[in-house]
Amino acid sequence: MGSQAGFALPEFRSGLPVGPGWVTGTDSAPVVFPYDGSVVAHAPVGSVEHAHAALDAGAAAVKPVGRLTSAVRRAILLDVEAALRSRSDEFVELLIAETGKTRGDCEGEFSRTVFTWSAAAEEVAHIHGETVPLDLQAAGAGMIGFWTRRPIGLVVGIAGFNGPLLLASHKIAPSIAAGCPVICKPAPATPLTALWLADLVRQAAERHGAPPEIVQVLTGDAEVGHTLVTDPRVAAVSFTGSAAVGHRIARDAAPRKVLLELGSNAALVVADDADLDKAADAVLRGGYYFNGQACIAVQRVIVCESVREEFVGKLTARIGELKVGDPRDPETRVAPLITEAATRRTLDWIEQAERAGAKVLHGGRVVDRTIEPTILLDVPETADAWCEEIFAPVVAIRSVPDVATALELVNRSRYGLHASVFTRSLATAFAAVEELEVGGVVVNEVPGFRSDIMPYGGVKDSGIGREGPRFAIEELTVTRMAVIRPE
C-alpha cells in the first residue's frame, strides 16, 4: 500500500493478517486524507468469509496463547513498545494522513500508545490470585483453597476512528498480557495504523515462539462486525464507539462479556470561586483537541451566573488563538472532521440550536474546510448540541444559580463518562466526586484528562467496563477457584 497523497508513509505488508499469514486478493477501499479528500492509500477490505476464517484461527489459538509464559507475553509487549519507538515519525505521519488530526494531537496519541504497551508489559507480573481460608467454615477444615486468574479466551476488539492506534492498542496489548488471542476490527475510515501495528506484533510474536494468530486484524463493514461479535467462540467483545452501535453489539453478543466505551457530552462546571483564567484555558484545550472528535472533549460548560459574564469574556477573547486548517502545519490546532457528512451534521446541529434560542459567540461556519472553533451560549437542554454527543469543535454554555444546580444539570444527561469542576473549595470538589454520575471526575483540569493506566470508562449510556491495562486485564481474565483436600 503506497501513498498517493504526498505523505512519506511506510511500506506495508499486503493483505489482512488473518490466520497464520496475510490474506491477499481482497477487495480494497481508499483511505482519504480528511483535509483535502486526496487518497492516502487503498486498504484491504475483509468479508464475512474472512471473519469466519479469523474466528476459526482465533479459536484454535486460545490454548496455545493461553499457555504462553508470563515471561514470553511480557517480552512480546516490550518488543512492540521498542518497535513503536523506533518508528515514531512514520506512525505520526500515518496518523495525520488517515485521521486528519493535527500534528500535535497525533504526536500525543503516539506517545500515549507507547506508554500503553509499556504499562501492559508491567501488569503481566501482577496477574495472580489469593489463598482462601476455607476453614472459616467447619466443612472446610483441613482443606486448601486458592484462586487464580485465567485468560477469558478469544477477544474481539473494535476500535473507533478518532484514535486508531491508541484505541487498537488498548484492545490488543491487554489481551496479549492476559493470554488471549485477539481479533481487532479498526474503523473503516482509519485502518492503516492498526494493520501496521499488527505486523509489528506478529514479528515480536515470531521472535518469541508465539503463534501469529495472537493478533489478527479484520477490516470490513457492519456485517463483518456482526459476524465477529455473534460467534459463540468469542469470550469477550471490547468496543469503542457510539452509544447506538454499542447497544446493538451488547444485544448481539449476549451472553458473552461485553466491554463498552461509548459516547458522552462531557461537562465542565465553573464554580463561582473558580480561577476563571484556568477554566477558560481548559475549555480551549479540552473542547477542541482531536478536532472535537473525542468522547471526553468539553462539550457542555455550566457556569455559575455570578461569574458568567467574566468567564465568557475571557473565553471569547482567546478563542481566536486556535489556528484552523491543514493538520500538517505544526501551528494548527483544529482541522477538518473525519468526513464531509460529519461536518454537515455538525452545522445542522448548530443551526438547530440557534433556532431554539442559542447565540453563536464564535465560529459556526467552515473556514479552510474546517468548522471554526465554535462557542454557543444559552443552548436549550433539548437541543442536540447539548443533550447528544456532537463530536466536533463545538462548546455549548449555560449558566445556573449555583454549584448544586450545576451538578444536577450535569446529571440530567443519558451519558456519564467524564466531567470536571473548577473550584477552589475542597467541599465543592468532594461534592462533585460524590454526586456526579460519571465514570471519572476531574477537579481543576479538563474532563478529557486521561492517564492510560487509570480505570477509564463510563456509566449510563456511556458504557460498561473499564480500560487501562490493569483494569482491562482484569476484565479479560476469569477467576478459577481451586479446592484441595490433601490425602
Image: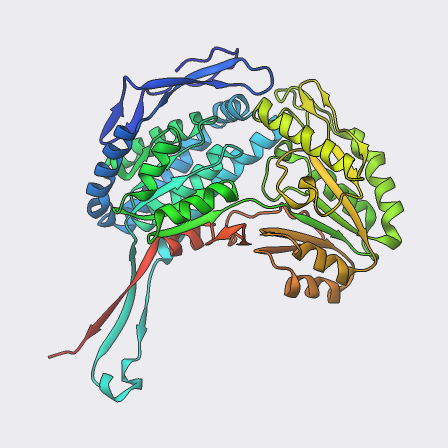
Image quarter in which the C terminus is found: bottom left
- The residue lying at 29 percent from left, 86 percent from top is 137
Image quarter in which the N terminus is found: top left
From the top left corner, tell me how far across and down residue 176 is, in percent.
33, 45
Where, by quadrant of the figure, is residue 231 drawn? top left
Where, by quadrant of the figure, is residue 56 drawn? top left
Question: As drawn, is 160 to the left or to the right of 416?
Answer: left
Relative to residue 105, is residue 237 depicted above or below? below
- The residue lying at 60 percent from left, 32 percent from top is 105
Question: As drawn, is 310 to the left or to the right of 428?
Answer: right
| Frontmost residue, 366 versus 83 | 366
| Frontmost residue, 397 versus 269 | 397
Question: As drawn, is 326 to the left or to the right of 475?
Answer: right
Q: How is the image coloured?
A: rainbow
Q: Tag count in the figure?
A: 0
Q: Residue furthest left?
A: 487
Q: Residue furthest front?
A: 355
From the top left corner, tell me how far across and down residue 337 is, in percent.
61, 27
The answer to whether any part of residue 443 appears in the image is no
The answer to whether any part of residue 192 appears in the image is yes
| Frontmost residue, 54 versus 195 | 54
From the top left corner, tell me how far across and down residue 429 is, in percent.
71, 62
From the top left corner, tell me how far across and down residue 359 is, in percent.
82, 36
Where, by quadrant of the figure, is residue 484 drawn? bottom left
